[in-house]
Image: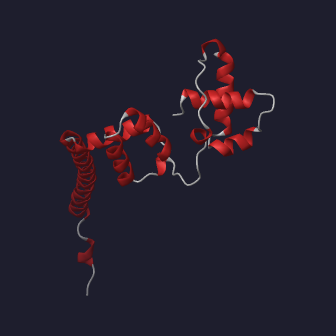
Amino acid sequence: MYSKAFRTLMVQKMTVPDRPDVESLSAEVGVPQSTLYRWVADAGKLIPQIEVAPSPTREQTQRPSRMKRPQDWSAEAKLAAVMEAAVLSDEELGAFLRSKGIHEAQLQEWRELMLSGLNPSSVQRTKTKKETKRVRELEKELRRKDKALAETAALLVLKKKAQEIWGDEDDDTED
């Protein structure tokens, strides 16, 4: 979810001699401490493969507290972001994504979700799944009731046979 440039910057910040403590860096940029430690470990394994990327500016690395996490966005806000981003050029898109605090992959995922929601076959599949589930529930209930009816019928047959064998006990009593 985080760009290579951002990860590289965080690894650099954590490996320089006058580095900040991990707790404060984690709180400052909004990345869990475990993720920061994993990036440093991965960088140690991949040192020959790390590309030197231009360092992002401070505003790119900070997550203002007023920004919502992408998971917390409403469907309407996601739709608005997708529609707004659709008309932007690449340079404008980058600035837009930074200002909203989202990644391009998230924007693409939202776009695909919205397009799949407009696809009648996906709506039909959802409807079919619900109908299939309802049919299964009804069949299960029908089997249960059939078993109960069969049990009741068997009890009635046994009662009649018992009356035939031993007679009706109610006949011996006088009112």
Q: Find the residue positioned furthest to the top.
A: 48
118 or 141: which is nearer to us?
118
158 or 133: which is nearer to us?
133
Count of numbered marks: 0
Colouring rule applied to residues: secondary structure
Q: Quadrant of residue 153?
A: bottom left
Q: Position of residue 146 (x, y in %)?
A: 23, 52
Q: Find the residue positioned furthest to the right.
A: 17
Kindly identify the residue that appears in the image at 43 percent across and 38 percent down: 106
Q: Tell me: residue 94, above or below residue 45.
A: below
Q: Tell me: residue 104, above or below residue 83.
A: above
Q: Tell me: residue 61, above or below residue 146.
A: above
89 or 144: which is nearer to us?
89
Q: Is residue 170 left or right of residue 57?
A: left
Q: Position of residue 99 (x, y in %)?
A: 49, 45
Q: Position of residue 113 (x, y in %)?
A: 32, 41
Kindly identify the residue that appears in the image at 67 percent across and 45 percent down: 28
171 or 63: which is nearer to us?
63
Q: Position of residue 124 (x, y in %)?
A: 20, 43
Viewport quadrant of the C terminus: bottom left
Q: Is residue 71 left or right of residue 40?
A: left
Q: Tell me: residue 161, above or below residue 135.
A: below
Q: Quadrant of residue 8?
A: top right
Kindly identify the residue that appears in the image at 58 percent across and 26 percent down: 54
